[in-house]
Image: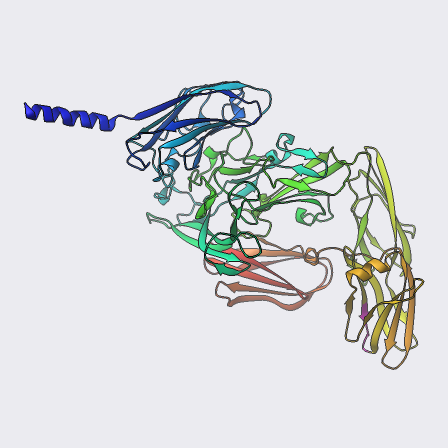
Amino acid sequence: MKKIYFFFLLCLLSISHSIAQSYTSAGASISDHGSPLQIPILISALDSATLTTNYGLERVCMHINHTADRDLAIYLMSPNGTTVELSSGNGGLNDNYTATCFDMNATQLISAGTPPFTGDFIPEHSLGSFNDGQTGNGIWRFIITDYLIGDTGSLIDFTLTFGYSPAPPISVSIGPCDDYTPTACQCPDGDSSCWLLPDILTATSMLQDTFWQRESFNQLMVTNSCANVGFGPMELIGTGVWTCNDSIVGGPGLCPDGQFAKQRVKQRVFIKNAGVGFFDFIDTLVGNMQFHSDLGHNHLHIDDWAVNTIRIRGPQADIRTWPIIGTGTKVSFCIYDHLICGGTFANCQYGSDMHLYSSLPNNGLGNGFTSCGTSIQGLSVGYSDIYDWSLAGQEILFDSICNGNYFLVTEFDPYNRFLDGDRSNNISIVPITLKQQIPNCCKTKFRIDTLNYNENIYQFVDLTTPMPDHWYWNFGNGQTDTTPFPIINFNDATELHISLNTSNNSPCSDSTSKNILVHTDISDTCNGTFNLFFQEYSFWRSAFILLGDTSLIDSIVIMNLDSHGHIINQHGSSFSIEIISDSIAREIINDSIRVIVYYNNSCTYVIDAVYNILIENIVDPKSNYHISLAPNPAKNETFLSYELTQPTTISIQLYNASGQIVETLLNDYKQVKGNYQYKIGLPQKGFYLVRTKFNNMEHIEKIFSY
């Protein structure tokens, strides 16, 4: 009898051990494009206090009545704050989630299902994110956000089920290519060995859709979507080294200057080797992450991830050289798998190219970036990270600009810190019409770039805001033009009055003018011959330049010929280019100038001139050569291309990771204006530095060979 009773007790214990524990809560109405619905549910008396691979969350079921399922983003949050995206933007205009369950053992992705989604589906993110040893007892939250206006509905109820067959932890991918089966991962060129690089794009469609924007006076709130459509994850790992102003400190916290300490971050690139059952990898430092409490996010951001700008069209093809009218207040972001690549929100679309999760060869690789953690952040293949316009820091600020047409630009990795498989899709640009700024106004402005000093060739660059539709230039010598960026050759050295009239279809018109001095050769009785002209080097910063024989010059004095006739700057000998300080630049605009040249043989030469504004050249010096290095990363070889807008002395050298010179392509070689390209051989896999010297300016770019 005792044996029978003991056997019966063992059966009861076995049965009770295999029974799952389910918890159900009623729902509520979902606000139409309003605040997120958050329904708390108390979980208590779980069989195991911690959620692990042995016991944890198995499945989540729900019932939602709602028109146009695409409006909804659905999340589950655990007591410790871990948040998993269950479904976002799925279902199109069809209705309801009826008896919908999320289970990692299902055979169909929720993104591939159709409403009313009855049955079991794999969620957008893995439920295994919860089963990492965290506590299961406590307040969980079921969260639903309606992103689009016009459709309504309610959460009827939801159920959380815990048991002894939990979802696998987040380190286990749901696709055939995962951290443990590299042989199932594809290489970009079909090889059996390769570096699996991410490819981060900025979603053009989401940037263009006015639904994802909010405009008010002097600012525009925008939404970013950066998506990984490459062959490997963008994995960013904290090094554990924290700094305050380059001094190493013990950990996160406030620095003496009141700013939070920064942690150095490295990017990890996966390497697939033929016939090897595990990944190799290589790490490279890419910057920092920093705690951002001031934004109200209470998490860490990766620095220099992306930047938003409002611009007007410039004369160069490179969008990054176009004049900036307003800049976003934030370039750092928390990076994690926010939304799977799908067609509803077009969150992985660049131009006309729509990238879908199912079409990416290594989709899911890296799956599991679910939070803004200190140790790891990133983007898995086939996921995007979205920063909504409503979040603090998403504003682009301007200063009293006019309503009208501009360009909205977002750029991933503006400082080239990260390794990326394709640089061509890092920048998205869309036209935008601002309507909440100053009405019925336009402000005409232009600058003058010196293209060839010796031949008197200048480019006139329209800087009018908003962008006009019509231009009329008068160059004071009989020449006119009706394009925004005319290039003019002045045959005679003289002082000219330049005017620009612009108009748009608003309608609005405006005009401006400048007096410029086209350079002239000056010969004097003191036997010194040189060329003299003025230029504006940057805003409120000017220069006078002497070219030619200056060996006999002892010093130069520049005077402002106002009622006081005082000296505003004086320069000694041994010069070819002298920069006037900011305050002096303000004094000499709209004024009379006297330049006195003192020779070392006691002769003196005086030049008087009246300038409405000095001849300009406010182009960033680097834009004089428009350098690019592509492809980067590269296999075996890459190409360095640049454009010179003036004669320049060039040096080009390739260095390896140890700082040794691998090859010198050019060494102080003089080149004239034009376009140039050089092939650079990369003999081995690894990192290289390409050092290019243009006159006295250097450009160093890192390249990765795989």
Residue ranking furthest to the right:
563
Residue 651 sits inside the magenta stretch: no
Q: Residue at 78% of width from left, 60% of height from top? A: 582
Relative to 534, 94 lies left or right: left
Residue 548 sits inside the magenta stretch: yes
Q: Quadrant of residue 444?
A: top right
Q: Residue at 34% of width from left, 40% of height from top? A: 133
Relative to 118, 566 lies left or right: right
Q: Residue 161 at what x, y percent from top left?
A: 34, 26
Relative to 591, 536 lies left or right: left
Reply above or below: 620 against 98: below
Q: Residue 370 at what x, y percent from top left?
A: 45, 39
Q: Residue at 35% of width from left, 34% of height from top? A: 136
Q: Is residue 369 visible?
A: yes
Which one is in front, 251 or 241?
A: 251
Reply above or below: 353 against 699: above
Q: Residue 467 at what x, y percent from top left?
A: 77, 40
Q: Which residues make up the magenta segment?
A: 546-551
Which one is in front, 201 or 250?
A: 250
Reply above or below: 413 against 345: below
Colour setup of the view:
rainbow
